[in-house]
Image (cartoon, rainbow, N blue to C red):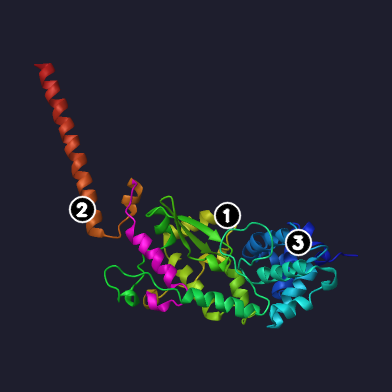
Amino acid sequence: MTVNPLKSSLRTITTTNDLERVVVNALWGTSWSPREYANHQAAYSTYYSGIYQPLCRAACSGDWRIPDYTHEDVISIINSLKLTNDKKNDVLKDIPHAVNLSPSQSERAVNLAAGLLVPLNFDGIGGARPGKRISWEPEKTLKQTIDEEFQVLSNQAVPANPVCATCTSTIKFPRKFGLWDLKFIAGFNIVWTNSLLDHLSVVDEENQITVYIFHQVSILELHQTVTPDVIPADLIEETFETLALLLPRTDEKTTAWYDKLQKKHDLDPGTFRRSYLKLEDRELHHFKYWRSRLVKLKKAFDEHEPNKPTQWWRDDRKPVQWWTFWVAILVLILTILFGLIQSVTGLLQVILS
């Protein structure tokens, strides 16, 4: 008799393709056979290895680890979160084996389910995870918690324009504003994150600017169809548009760079398949949730001056300045070269005379 992988313990989570496929099917309402899943695995294995596995392991470790919970148990809580919009206190009453769990263990089980459903860094799961944490309070629903968190983000003031305090609404994001440009012209460090709340965060430490980019887009696409009421629809669409802005699929340099990244890192291939962003959509007023972070990122990029020859060569954001610099370098090289030739010629004349 075939054993259902979902009945296995969360503590013994494996990396087998069969468990991965069964988990994805159960979570997101698909019914892929092993052969069919092979065609989709590149997209959903990033979720399984980047979110599902580490969160399950974290929940099963530490002082308040969940005892004897199976994949089926936690998925039943997730399915309940999809179908209802209950307050956390009410969700806690109906979880599997509630009578056998302490309040802290019950909290961890529900927080784990929330973190597996929504790509956010929920408190109370266990383990050490980087990025901003989000707390689901007992008297709030999951949707209410998410809405409030991103409402705070959308209400953040846009950094002041030092030239014109009233000009923020007309800021446009140029084509030279992709991740390739940020990395190879400005030398920014690009970190790929599994938490949507960390998307576009800019951190400046020890003269090194780090930009966090969310890449679990296949899960957001499933939210659009399977659970359309959990994450705001306009937030999902706007997130896709920021990826289209920063990863233009028509740019050959960006394409080659991202292809290499995918071979080295477990990144969602859908991140680079966003629709082309129209010119009129590259203005600041088009963005509601990510506007303040986009402005901060653009400000950091605009203020950066190249400090390496390769960066100077690639940095043609200001064409006149770029040509002036390289013409000056060429003149300097030719001056040195002609001076050297004259010195050698003079030395030969002295020797021959």
Kind of residue indicated by mark 3: Trp
User: Seen in the image, is 178 located left or right of residue 18?
Assistant: left
Image-quadrant location for residue 131: bottom right
Which residue was labeled with disc 3? 64
Kind of residue indicated by mark 2: Thr
**Which region shows up in magenta?**
283-308
Query: Magenta includes 307?
Result: yes
Q: Which numbered disc, 2 or 3, marks the residue that appears first in the sequence?
A: 3
- Quarter of the image where the C terminus is located: top left
Classify mark 3: residues with Cα within 10 Å, few (<14), some (14-19) or many (20+): many
Q: Which numbered disc, 1 or 3, marks the residue that appears first in the sequence?
A: 3
Q: How far apart are labels 2 and 3 at the CA level?
A: 64 Å
User: Seen in the image, is 176 located left or right of residue 118?
Assistant: left
Q: Residue placed at 12% from the left, 24% from the top?
A: 346
Image-quadrant location for residue 24: bottom right
Which residue was labeled with disc 1? 265
| Element type at mark 3 | loop
Query: Magenta includes 205?
Result: no
User: Seen in the image, is 331 located left or right of residue 72?
Assistant: left
Q: Which numbered disc, 1 or 2, marks the residue that appears first in the sequence?
A: 1
Image-quadrant location for residue 65: bottom right
Q: Residue placed at 48% from the left, 65% from the top?
A: 200
Kind of residue indicated by mark 1: His
Mark yes or no: residue 248 visible. Answer: no
- Quarter of the image where the N terminus is located: bottom right
Give the number of the mark in front: 1 or 3. 3
In this view, the residue in front, 126 or 28, is 126
Give the number of the mark in front: 2 or 3. 3
Mark yes or no: residue 63 visible. Answer: yes
Which residue was labeled with disc 2? 324
Q: How far apart are labels 1 and 3 at the CA level?
A: 32 Å
